[in-house]
Image: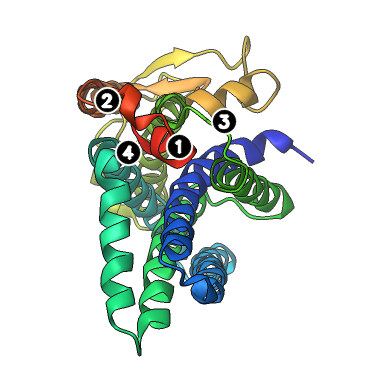
Amino acid sequence: MNFTEAIPTFVITLREGVEAALVVGIVLACLKKSEQSHLNSWVYTGIAAGIAASACVGALFNQLLYALSTSNLPYAPVIKQLLEGSLGIVAIVMLSWMLIWMTQQARFLKAEVEGAVTAALKENTNAGWGVFGLIFIAVLREGFETVIFVSAQFQQGLTPALGALGGLLGAAIVGALIFKWGVKIDIRLFFKFMGILLLLIVAGLAVSALKHFDQAAAILSQTDSKYAPICVYFDRTAQLHSCILGPLVWNAEAVLPDRQFPGVLLKALFGYRDRLYLIQAIGYAIFSVTVGSLYFQKLGRGPTVSPKNTQSAPESTLSQ
């Protein structure tokens, strides 16, 4: 069992899970403060429903990819590669947006959630459903982002599932430490570290997505000769060549292969590849510079925690 396959899934699930855990913790604290703890069951039901819905979406994506990989239709391999590449692009956009948006909006998270809970409690007859909907959407949003990432990497089997379970468990522990036992955790530092790690993982996903599109073009050109012009780059003198990615600019397969340790660990954490083509290198650089710059800009605008806000664990830990 290759446990390095679980690392990206663990990192994504942990970060997304902690965000959901913060929302859950704030809601439970609001219900306790409002003496409405009898609605806690709606919170737990919303958590379970959100996780179950995310799992169903993941199962559907994986079933579709598996069906395409085992299909005998002539263009099924092309569609599979295009679908994986497209899922990669969707995952990159969603995770990048989440990373930048959450960094900017985190300072308002507590006030927004408390406002939503207060509005739900005003509707006495539908208060439970209001709380359920708030938790369900929060968990489903984070779970959907994780599912898209896992599907984009075409990860199946026990190992990625263990990574996801480990991330969920870690998020639950962080939430319990903050809201149940009052442990003061520097959430801002946690998200800063996880954000940098997420940037590197998603940058690697950009390289993988481009590879899927290259493979789709190569398969299509070999399936039907009329599509041969799709391969705009083809170097017959090179042992390794791409179809649309340009010349090979990096080849460390003999020195540090990405399918063996420690290369496989670097691949999981930092997006390392032992072979890199020109367009992949450009894509990696553009993503790292643009999204990385936006992330650190938003990060630098975060407010500092004043002494007045350090009296209780939830207040101090939620200030980012």
Residue 99: which disc? 4
Which residue is identified by label 3? 268
Q: Which residue is mark 2?
A: 299
Which numbered mark, 4 or 2, is in the foreground of this view? 2
Sequence-wise, the earlier of marks 1 and 4 is: 4
Q: Give the number of the mark in front: 1 or 2.
A: 1
233 horizontally vs 40: left or right:
left
Q: Residue at x 70, y 21 (%)?
A: 261
* Marks 3/1: CA–CA distance: 37 Å
Report helix, strand or loop for mark 3.
helix
- Choose top left, top right, bottom left or bottom right for residue 93: top left
**What secondary structure is found at the residue carrying circle 1?**
loop
Image quarter (top left, top right, bottom left or bottom right) of the N terminus: top right
Q: Are marks 1 and 2 in contact (CB under 8 Å)?
A: no
- Which residue extends farthest top? 255
Query: Which picture quadrant has residue 294?
Result: top left
On the rendered structure, is 27 left or right of 62?
left
Residue depicted at x 48% and y 41%:
15
Kind of residue sitting beneath label 2 = Leu
Residue that label 1 marks:
312
Q: Residues within 10 Å of mark 3 (few under 14, many from 20)?
A: many
- Give how far apart the Cα atoms at labels 1 and 2 are: 24 Å
